[in-house]
Amino acid sequence: MPAQRTPDHPPSAGTRELSEAGRRSALLKAGALQNAILNSANFSIIATDEKGVIQIFNVGAEHMLGYRADEVIDQVSPSDLHDPMEVTARAVVLSTEQGTQIAPGFEALAFKASRGIEDIYELTYIRKDGSRFPAIVSITALRDDAAGLIGYLLIGTDNSARKLVEQQLNEAVAAAEKANLAKSDFLSSMSHELRTPLNAILGFAQLVESGTPALTPPQKRSIDQILKAGWYLLDLINEILDLALIESGKLSLSVEPVSLQEVLMECRSMVESQARQRSIGMAFPRLPAQSYVKADRTRLKQVLINLLFNAIKYNRPSGHVSVECAEPTPGTLRISVRDTGAGLTSEQVSQLFQPFNRLGQEGGKEEGTGIGLVVTQRLVALMGGEIGADSTQGVGSVFWVEMALASAPGLALEITAEPPRLEVADGAAMKTVLYVEDNPANLELVEQIIARRTNLRLLGAADASLGIEFARVYRPEVILMDINLPGMSGLDAMKVLRGDPDTAHIPIIALSANAVPRDIERGLEAGFFNYITKPIKVGQLMDAIDAALVISVQRIAGESPQDNT
């Protein structure tokens, strides 16, 4: 009778675990694994004892570092193969992070690994011949169940190729930035240089136009052409200068609450004459007096005027331009400029903000550069806003700008009760404070603050040129100066005042929304007596004015003023 066959059964889970453990044990004991590690030429594998003395130094380490294994085993630590200054720097950083003193040696390399944290660091290896190369090293603690910490394993790889690529990339970026900066500086310099002869051309042409005897019709046409070309060239220079300043990062903005109603009124007065010449009707919205947006006042005007001029220039005869305001989302105000021109195709709309792209208008009767909208877009972005356009052929276009809404400019510290007015003795001399500020709301705010002091009076100037003239005529005791002013900046105005013997002694306090620490440092380094940031703190402003008054009196009396810093 044939023997009965025992049916096959799959191994149990326990049996499978034992077999897998057996395979792992066999793998770990196999000489093949040890040989692979010790003979790997692509990675340096170094093992140390618990004190950090090298015990294993594989073929890859020999190739990378130039030492034979017998030259380092039981003799040196991996820290001896690194740049000692980098090892010391690592020890300092770790000591600061951990709040404990860490020795600048192997302890600095193994500190994290000794605490059970696998560590990867970048340091420079030094070969036997003294040459160096950057390396990435992973260090892990080796532990035994019975003995605990028995050493460390360091696996390193040559990082030269990646560092070379990084260096080449950084050099390429630096070269591109340098070239871009050089281009922008050149454009800026040339723009300024071109203004001088252009000023003479336009100035003398206007004198000839308005002089006597009256021009003959041919002469009048010639002068008109000179003036037309001259003013167009000036617009081109201004646009190139703005673009160069933006690209070089040198354009300084003062983003603060700006009254949109005031700005729109000023823009309307500047474009209405051109609209009348072309029989273009205009409509502006009625806004609440407290409609404020976060913007640089001068640059917001530039943006809106550019959009309005374009709406007039590219409109149909006897067309219409309307300005509309709405809140598309809470906290945001959209200002739209709508025209009744020929409109644009979807392809033209997609190309609107490309430099020097006039969308096929190069041969048209309207002059242009293709820069204006690019400058406008970048100015809006710098002020934290958005710009866009929608257009329908045969109907017209609408260009819109969205800006963040803002509260009316006020005091940083709310005043719950009206502070008492400080009275002065009869016959005491009034002191004059000159405030150079282009934002009427800010000027009014400071005027109300100064009005609480009966010994002070305030003069206001809307731009730097007028401020310089007022300073020379009225000789104020103190000058408050905004930094970002139309035309000449507050910094440049201060240099002019410092260079004039009649105004050099007057303390000048910067009053600006530029509150970045580096801006404040630059202002003080440039020579401002003090630098006050907006929103204004009444106490801080008045303390600064009082300190400046003391210095002003001392300077006028010929005394040596105390250090105000």
Image: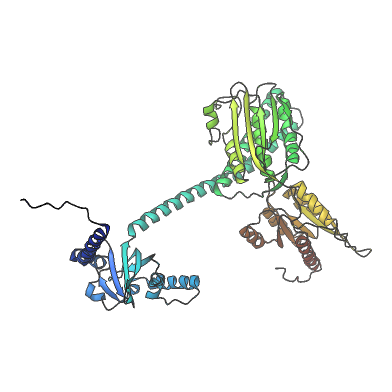
In screen coordinates, is 478 left or right of 394? Answer: right
Dividing the picture into quadrants, the one containing residue 323 is: top right
Q: Residue 428, percent across and down?
A: 90, 64
In screen coordinates, is 171 left or right of 128? Answer: right
Count all numbered tags in the image, as a single digit.
Answer: 0
For this orientation, the residue located farthest to the left is 1
Q: Residue 557, percent across and down?
A: 81, 68
Q: Residue 4, percent across and down?
A: 11, 52
Q: Residue 197, percent across and down?
A: 63, 41
Question: In percent of the image, x 75 and y 62: which residue is there?
Answer: 540
In screen coordinates, is 125 left or right of 358? Answer: left
Quadrant into which the C terminus falls = bottom right
Between 261 and 367, which is closer to the camera in this rendering?
261
Between 287 and 235, which is closer to the camera in this rendering?
287
Q: Is residue 460 visible?
A: no
For this orientation, the residue located farthest to the front is 1
Between 211 and 231, which is closer to the camera in this rendering?
231
Between 224 and 447, which is closer to the camera in this rendering?
447
Q: Is residue 405 visible?
A: yes
Question: How is the protein colored in the picture?
Answer: rainbow
- Vertical placement of 506 versus 292: above or below? below
